[in-house]
Amino acid sequence: VLRGAVFVRSGGTLNIAAGTTIIGESGSVGTLIVLKGGRINAIGTRTAPIVFTSDQPVGSRDRGDWGGLIINGSAPLNLEGGEGQGEADTGIYGGTNPNDNSGTLRYVRVEFAGVEFSPDNELNGIAFQGVGRGGSFDYMQIHMNRDDAIEFFGGTVDVKHVVASNAADDSFDWTFGWTGRAQFVAIHQRGDDADNGIEADNNEFNNNLLPRSNPQIYNITICGDPDRNEGSESVRAANLRRGTSFTIRNFLVTGFKSVGFQISDASTAAQVDNGTSQIGAGVAWGMTSNMHSSVMPYITSGRFPNVTLGRDPGLSTTACAEHTNPNFQPSGVATLAGGQLAPIQPPNDGFFEPVTFIGAVPPAPADNWMTGWTSFPQR
């Protein structure tokens, strides 16, 4: 049980065994905070995941029942002085060590978190605050969070096999100079309360501060909620803004009520124009505007290559938008965009895996890495 704010202090390591359930006490705002210099090793398995969850009874659980999981590291960011103060006083983060090691998360679920301390001041499900690339963060689900599912505040941390489902704000968010890598990311939204699939910033106070946010993201599926009866939110798949750079490749995007990717300002467009930012090898379909007018010139010119719009890639929008059992697995390679849309291979750098498919999950009948450890309860 997490009773109040529980800290892993500098020099300490918290080890959590496979199959453990951690309860966040709602009355005391149970929260787990790993301070700079501390480590968490929460290592579950596919059949025995580690679950952080609410103390409320099944059927009564809701977003924001408890705090969340906050990890602070000593990797670089672009705030003045090189350090930041975490939201809701969750620790000082940032530094000069890109290889800082904050531990391991593997087969971990965080659900019904994101308590609101004050108006517009909620916790993220998992917050990586100045976390370095020395740790290992693989197979993580953040479900039914009141604020963002997962957010990166600077740092160099890498993540793989991430599921962000039913967050009430953004699903996958970065700011303050995140330069990490991500592969196999599945986003599922619920239209009763949701913002962007991706919200991407460099620095809101000065769009051109360095180090500039510039993550590399390969193989991502972003599934919005087209159901207007449930709510009017889940409008936009990605809001790329405030001077961020980015690489987004091998993507499937569907189900949002308005638009796919959007570049929202001149400082962000400049990163495309100078060749720093890349989008390529993906399909967007089933939306009012599959790509925003700010992105279309780059697609039509070939600057963003191999992007197909408005063609069903063999992934049912209805199936991946189904809240209790979303299916992110396309029906087969031959149906992708009407036939063999080849992925762009990620760098051979020891982190990324070579791929034969686009989207987060390989087409059937290949193994679905989400099976066995994820869960999508609504209450």
Image: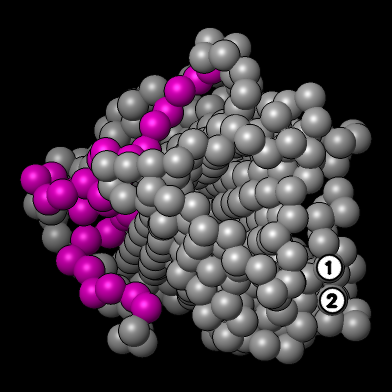
Amino acid found under the numbered disc labelled 1: Ile
Report which quarter residue 29 is drawn in: top right
Q: Is residue 353 magenta?
A: yes
Residue at the image position 38 percent from the left and 41 percent from the top: 19
Residue at the image position 28 percent from the left and 73 percent from the top: 353
Which quadrant, please, contains the N terminus?
top right
Secondary structure mostly seen in the magenta stretch: loop
Report the disc number at residue 17. Answer: none
Pick the front one: 133 or 213: 133
Helix, strand, or loop for circle 1?
strand
Pick the front one: 210 or 26: 26
Residue 155 % position (x, y): 66, 75
Label 1 crowd (10 A; few <14 / some 14-19 / many >=20):
some
Q: Nearer the viewer, mark 2 or mark 1?
A: 1
Contact (Cβ within 8 Å) of mark 2 with mark 1: yes
How many dots with numbers? 2
> Is residue 83 among the parts visible in the rendering?
yes
Residue 373 % position (x, y): 33, 40
Amino acid found under the numbered disc labelled 2: Glu
Helix, strand, or loop for circle 2?
loop
Pick the front one: 63 or 183: 63
Residue of label 1:
92
Residue at the image position 21 percent from the left and 46 percent from the top: 368
What is the magenta range? 351-379
Residue of label 2:
83
- Residue 373 lies, with reference to residue 333, above or below; the image says above
> Is residue 246 among the parts visible in the rendering?
no
Report which quarter residue 191 is drawn in: top right
